[in-house]
Image: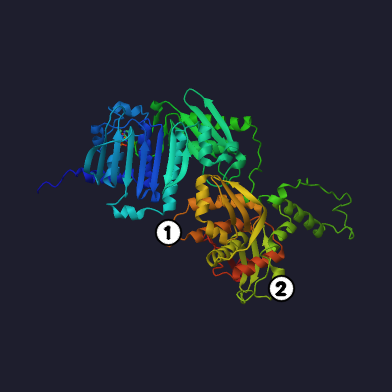
Amino acid sequence: MADIIQLLPDHVANQIAAGEVVQRPASVVKELLENAIDAKATSIKLIIKDAGKTLVQVIDNGKGMSLTDARMCFERHATSKIRKAEDLFNIHTKGFRGEALASIAAIAHVELKTKIEGEEIGTQICIEGSHVNSQEPIVTPTGTTISVKNLFYNIPARRNFLKSNTVEIRHIIDEFHRVGLAHPQIEFILLSNGTSIFNLPSSNIRQRIVNIFGAKTNEKLVPVSEETDIVVVDGFIIKPEFAKKSRGEQFFFVNNRYIKSSYLHHAILSAFEGLIKDSSQPGYFLFLEVDTQSIDINIHPTKTEIKFDDEHSIYAMLRSTIKHSLGQFSIAPVLDFNKDSGLDTPYDYNQKKPVPPTIEVDRNFNPFQRDSSQGNFNPTYKREKTSSWEAMYVGLENGASVEKFSKHDLKFESDEVTGNLFDTNESERGRSTFQLQNKYLISPVKSGMMVIHQNLAHQRILYEELLKNITVKEAVSQQLLFPLQIQLSSIDIAIIKNIQEQLEHTGFVFSAFKEDTLEISGIPVTITESQIPSILEQLINDINEEIPEPGFSQNDLLAKSLAKSFAVKTGTSLNKEEQEHIIHQLFACKEPTIAPNNKPILITIDASDLDKKFM
Ligand code: ADP
Ligand code: MG
């Protein structure tokens, strides 16, 4: 049989390698920024178009490349960063595999302009799918400019696989944050479609964090600093009271390289234990310095995991350092331990002084005294006590919750949809509906009983209502006496601006978009002013985590997110009228059984099933 094995041509090998190195525009951003840093640039500008799908350009003032190097850098395994195998154990640069540029050039149109210090003339190279189209002398400043155009132009399957611009730009910004935080002394600029998104001057780490995440961040930071034989730790943690619902601001850097480590993350979690709610995430920016010989980073070009020789000691040290910082800055617990997230005190109650529980003892009460006037084991007496305690734990007296509801959605709708699902007439059903554990609404139906999840039910109701408002553009808004100023990072402001119109259809009125402040002068009638920051946080979070499906709609996402924020929470006690109202509205919905997040809203328990239990 004839020989059949052949060596793959270079451009094919490069394309295959590209599959590993370049997943999306953000991977190109990462590689190019890292190359600029390795070239000792002090100022780096990143320019993107269409979330990097059309253009990723990095302009640096680093050391540049000679004429030969400019040609060489696109060869596979071409690197200036290691020379012998031992160098692998002593890596101080970002790259070393010499694969990035070769891979990128295999799957895009790449243009390189570069010049080294002291030379008059630089070099320009144009390369397409690993094929060099031209190399010419050019006048250009010292440093390097690389433009990567039309990523995956020759691999349509990969190009089609890219997510929406919102998602891709989020990935780019994540990389930008990581690189920017790791190198505060370098100036970074990010322009997207001609608009400046970040302009980060050379600074210290604290200023860098504030420049990226907004002026408000400054007061939230607590410094962390510790030095031992094996590791030096520096950086900041975010005060526990500012913990977020999302894993937003969690950064580990080891020797100025961003890494992920669930093990070390756990060390932080355990240091924060008892200080934040279980559902919240601590924020941190931690910089670890370890001997390069004691870690193993590389293995894979895009891997952000790392292996430490002495993981346990680093864990213990990190945990105690953070505990120490939390203690030193006397950050007292501000939240209850293991508090149910549904039990958040409403804003109006923050101002009110807590009323200490008083124990009333009926000194005359004697359970052994069977006196009819005393009402032995008086059930009414006992029930009254329980319910007032319950109300206190819930943090919402019935009165307060009625007020919150009655203002807006406590009008009864015409009752044609409910049909005869329920076996009793209205007034009887009203009497027989009840609430279980401040979480479920129980209602009798013909076949047995129905258990409705109050929060999910209300989400469904609001979701349909919001979706309608957004599309038919009708909204009721309450004007605020004083416009609300909300500080956000510039990228978050851009996100809100992007959906301004839809938000206005739900009742928001925005009076100004400033660089790091959002001014709101009107809000939907169904919410209170104090809820706004957390609603916006949730919304931005949801948008950032959005996974677009075909047919995905921004309106849908918005309605889902707001419905989640506005809906009556688990743990809220509802009076009969409110319970009734939710059930009514639910059955007027198009889809009363499934919540916007696809969870079931209700279950029915057949009387026949109950019968079986009693056999
Ligand atoms: P690696 O970074 O792993 O060495 P790359 O393919 O990213 O591999 O880059 C190949 C080489 O090209 C680098 O080792 C470096 O010498 C050179 N190079 C790449 N980008 C720049 C830049 N912005 N400035 C100067 N030299 C660069
Ligand atoms: Mg590199």
Q: Is residue 509 left or right of residue 370?
A: left
Please tell me whether mark 1 sits on a helix, a strand or a loop: loop
Q: Amino acid at mark 2?
A: Glu
Q: Is residue 284 left or right of residue 310?
A: right
Residue at 58% across / 42% down in the picture? Answer: 243
Identity of the residue furthest to the top in this view: 229
36 versus 473 height, above or below? above
Please tell me whether mark 2 sits on a helix, a strand or a loop: helix
Is there any visible trace of residue 302 in the rendered image?
no
Where residue 589 appears, as percent x and y from the top left, is: 57, 69
Q: Is residue 353 left or right of residue 312?
A: right
> Which numbered disc, 2 or 1, marks the residue that appears first in the sequence?
2
- Mark 2 or 1: in front is 1
Categorize mark 2 by other alpha carbons within 10 Å: few (<14), some (14-19), many (20+).
few
Where residue 197 appears, as percent x and y from the top left, is: 46, 44
Marks 2 and 1 sit apart, C-alpha to C-alpha, by 45 Å
Where residue 577 appears, as percent x and y from the top left, is: 71, 66
Residue identifier under label 1:
549
Residue identifier under label 2:
428
610 versus 368 height, above or below? below
Residue at 56% across / 45% down in the picture? Answer: 488
524 versus 230 height, above or below? below
**Quadrant the C terminus occupies:** bottom right
Q: Amino acid at mark 1?
A: Glu
Task: Out of 405 and 70, give the one closest to the viewer.
Answer: 70
Residue at 53% across / 33% down in the picture? Answer: 206
Q: Do the CB atoms of the residues marked 2 and 1 lie less than 8 Å apart?
A: no
Task: Out of 601 and 259, give the one closest to the viewer.
Answer: 259
